[in-house]
Amino acid sequence: MKRTAFITLGVAAIFGAGFTVSNVFSNHTVEKGNIEQTKNNKSKKEISMKLGAFSVSLSVKDLNVSKEFYENLGFKEFGGGMEQNYLIMKNGNALIGLFQGMFEGNILTFNPGWDENAKNLDEFDDVRKIQQHLKNQGVQMISEADETTAGPASFMITDPDGNVLLVDQHR
């Protein structure tokens, strides 16, 4: 089990390093809306989207027990409330949402327009532009943002392994 975890972490680290090196040595950038397409020396296209704050939204059985557990890891209440059946916990720039009875499974959440302190970002990609880009790439939507609106909206997708991603813009 530990060996598998170390191998997985190693592969992730190598992927991350490769992505960083690729971005550093790219030679051509084309702006499409706010979503940037980059071509490196091998003419491979990479997309850079400003997705905003990242958090993991956990479906918990007992909000009090989960709150205490994450407080023991150094997380502090940042948002939500016990009476609302959810808490947002923060440790540095790490965010974890604890949700009791609101959804099944866990969700990877991105908040365009916000940083990890829920402060407005000057530059970000609107949720509808991100959604349109993904749809153009053939990504199937679980739910969609209304592309005729502006401001707050969200959409949901799943990755190839069935993990749910929520892109949730609050402004």
Image (spheres, rainbow, N blue to C red):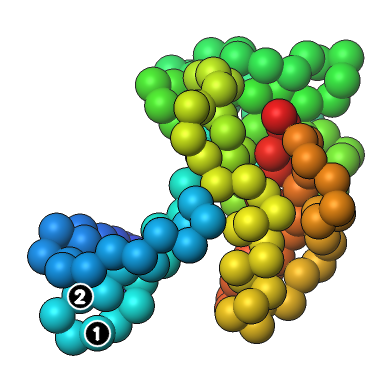
Give how far across and how far down residue 79 sits, in percent.
Answer: 67, 16
Depth order, front residue of 135/165 = 135
Crowd rating for badge 2 (residues with CA inside 10 Å; few <14, some 14–19, many 20+): some
Query: Considering the image in quadrants, where does the C terminus appear?
Result: top right
Indicate the quadrant where residue 11 lies: bottom left
Indicate the quadrant where residue 169 lies: top right
Query: Considering the image in quadrants, where does the N terminus appear?
Result: bottom left
Location of mark 1 (residue): 43
Q: Residue at x 74, y 59 (%)?
A: 156
Q: Are marks 1 and 2 in contact (CB under 8 Å)?
A: yes
Depth order, front residue of 128/69 = 128
- Residue 154 in sight in this render: yes
Give how far across and how far down residue 70 sits, in percent.
Answer: 54, 25
Type of amino acid at the residue the image marks with label 1: Ser
Give how far across and how far down residue 110 sits, in percent.
Answer: 59, 44
Give how far across and how far down residue 69 sits, in percent.
Answer: 57, 26
Crowd rating for badge 1 (residues with CA inside 10 Å; few <14, some 14–19, many 20+): few
Q: CA distance from mark 1 to mark 2?
A: 5 Å
Please state if 130 lies on the left or on the right of 105 as rendered: left
Q: Residue at x 48, y 35 (%)?
A: 123
Position of residue 56 relative to residue 45, above or below, is above
Depth order, front residue of 4/27 = 27
Marker count (numbered): 2
Position of residue 145 relative to residue 118, above or below, is below
Dot 1 falls on a residue whose secondary structure is: loop
Please state if 155 lies on the left or on the right of 133 as rendered: right
Please state if 59 lies on the left or on the right of 56 as rendered: right
Q: Residue at x 70, y 54 (%)?
A: 128
Location of mark 2 (residue): 40
- Residue 63 in sight in this render: no
